[in-house]
Image (spheres, helix red, strand yellow):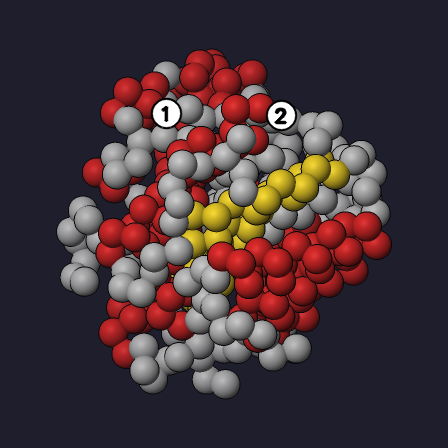
Amino acid sequence: MGQGSSQDPPGDDKQSQDDDAVPSGAVAGPRLYTAKFGNHQWPIKVGQNHKRLVTANILRETKEDIVEPLEITEDELLVVHTQEYLNSLKSSYNVALITEVAPVAIVPNFVLQRKLLSPFREQTGGTVLAGKLARDRGWSINIGGGFHHCSSSEGGGFCAYADITLCIKFMFNHLDNISKVLVLDLDAHQGNGYERDLGMDSKVFIADVYNRWIYPNDREAKRYIDKRIELDLHTEDTVYLGVIKTLLPEVLNDFKPDMVIYNAGTDILKGDPLGLLDITDEGVRDRDELVFTEVRKNRGIPILMLTSGGYQRNNAEIIANSIINLHSKGLITGPSE
Ligand SMILES: [Zn+2]
């Protein structure tokens, strides 16, 4: 695949030219996401994570380890989104509805495009690129993305672009040997956006574990979940990890995916104002370890991790520590290892 075609996955693709020499995974795009709006912490944790992982010697300041995605283009977004929906983002009022931050409605749209939507498009480009990297190298982590409330025709819950749907469409359309994808959604919220887009697609299996009492409670989208586990408020580590330990082998053995998209939201953490679950820092670490062990170590299936939701000051640190743990357990390895 050459660069520049509107049908190619967005991003700096130079790394994949010598994949044989670089057989391990990569982290897509951590340095470019700088927007900050309302109380949402995505853009902040991206930068912090990058620094922490460099300090831990997991990433180095080289193109080999860190791949910066390009912003996804309108033509590429149109693979999934309707023109009508993309046009609706030219209204600040509509962007305010999606972000649920009321003052956004009075911000000039060109400012929103530059400060908010452009970083979202970079993260979306990161998810699509990370799909290719995961296929080529076995694993990838997009430190960002996971906009699981956005569907092709409707944004919501701070999600303006349907990055998961886009990533899957690009994989099916452009990557060899990817014909069955499992979306494993362990964010605290139901992933109603891609569920609406992909629920009828038999090549996609959707496993979603979420708090039943919070946003979005999308009943129509629930019908599209192949394996649905609804948690109660303030679920703790033992119950949560027990559920995932049972779920993973069952789903992986039955569906036998060629790729797993792991939506690893950390809004499951105790104290999260939106997730309302009671998972500890160690619980997040153990969850991620469990997933990478079952998917990658035990079955050799490529995995793409997205960091998705998380609304506390310490999310960056906890995600970084979990990635460091994955590395120390040999579940992810750097290019030179
Ligand atoms: Zn969430």
Residue at 15%, 51% in the rendered image: 5
> 11 left or right of 97?
left
Label 1 and label 2: CA atoms lie apart by 18 Å
Q: In the image, is residue 221 above or below residue 188?
A: above
Residue at 63%, 47% in the rendered image: 186
User: Which is nearer the N-term, disc 1 or disc 2?
Assistant: 1
Residue at 60%, 79% in the rendered image: 330
Nearer-the-camera pick, 69 or 38: 69
Mark number displayed over residue 217:
2
Query: Is residue 80 among the parts visible in the rendering?
Result: yes
Placement of the N terminus among the 4 image quadrants:
bottom left
> 320 left or right of 68?
right
> 211 left or right of 304?
right
Q: Are marks 1 and 2 in contact (CB under 8 Å)?
A: no
User: Disc 1 or disc 2, which is closer to the eye?
Assistant: 2
Q: Which residue is mark 1?
A: 153
Query: Is residue 90 among the parts visible in the rendering?
Result: no
Q: Quadrant of residue 228?
A: top right
Nearer-the-camera pick, 147 or 67: 147
Mark number displayed over residue 283:
none
Q: Secondary structure at mark 1?
A: loop
Q: Quadrant of residue 24?
A: bottom left
Residue 309 percent across, percent down from the top left: 60, 42
